[in-house]
Image (cartoon, rainbow, N blue to C red):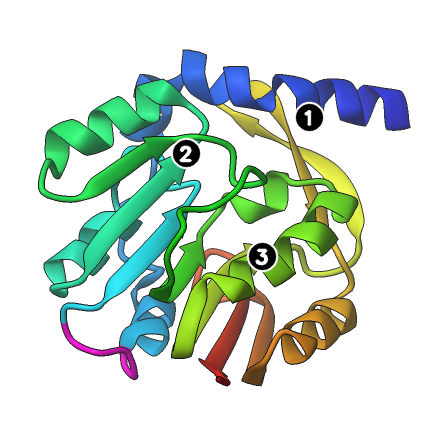
Amino acid sequence: MKDQLYRIKSQTQSVYQDRARAFDIQRGRSGMEHAWLERFVVSLPKAGAILDLGCGSGEPVSAYLINKGFHLTGIDYAAAMIDMARQRFPDHGWLVQDMVDPLPDRQFNGLISWNGFFHLSPEEQRHALPQFAAAVLPGGNLLLTVGPAEGEITGTVDGAPVYHASLDPAEYRDLLLAAGFATIEFQAEDPDCGLHSVLLALDKQA
């Protein structure tokens, strides 16, 4: 089972690259994320800088934040996704790289990974979270979608299997508190957000 999971994980990047256009067409734009996005940005400075990891084609999450007046730096490991984001929002920064690679050498008012972070393995997540926190300025926030409980599973993108993993919510809380966030909120399978499990870390301390 583990071998199959990690084979699917090794192919997840190519699934997003090869099926980028289909994913973009099928990606929901109902606005179900808006309540969480608003909680993420409400305390951030106007026209602040946000790092979007696993930004995809730039819609709908990056687009929402851009329309709120924030400056986006988006990272995705599928070049086809970044090409679409650049075409749509040429005044913002878009980079082709894996979110486990070194992040841009600067800090941001907010960091988000909506439906991206959970493609990392548990060990990658444990390593990445302190790095993500280090990229957030004092007073900044972090927003992630994760799983409702610890485990590794598969999902699909346009019919092709992709890998998902999550730590236990208590471990996320411990890691983010240790990284300096003052408040951690977690909602498992939010019924108002398409059953997404959402992790919000607020007010990074200096």
Query: x and y percent of residue 198 in the render?
Result: 54, 65
State the residue position of label 1: 9
From this view, report whether residue 89 is shown above or below residue 67.
Answer: above
Q: Is residue 135 left or right of residue 183?
A: left
From this view, report whether residue 169 is shown above or below residue 13.
Answer: below
Under tag 1, what secondary structure? Answer: helix
Q: Specify the segment rendered in magenta.
A: 42-46
Q: Residues within 10 Å of mark 3 (few under 14, many from 20)?
A: some
Q: Amino acid at mark 2?
A: Asp
CA separation, marks 3 and 2? 17 Å
Q: Is residue 202 left or right of residue 90?
A: right
CA separation, marks 1 and 3? 21 Å
Q: Is residue 196 visible?
A: no
Q: Residue at x 88, y 28 (%)?
A: 2
CA separation, marks 2 and 1? 16 Å
State the residue position of label 3: 131
Q: Is residue 52 left or right of residue 126?
A: left
The quarter holding residue 187 reads bottom right
Q: Residues within 10 Å of mark 2 (few under 14, many from 20)?
A: many
Query: x and y percent of residue 150 in the render?
Result: 79, 56
Quadrant that contains the N terminus: top right
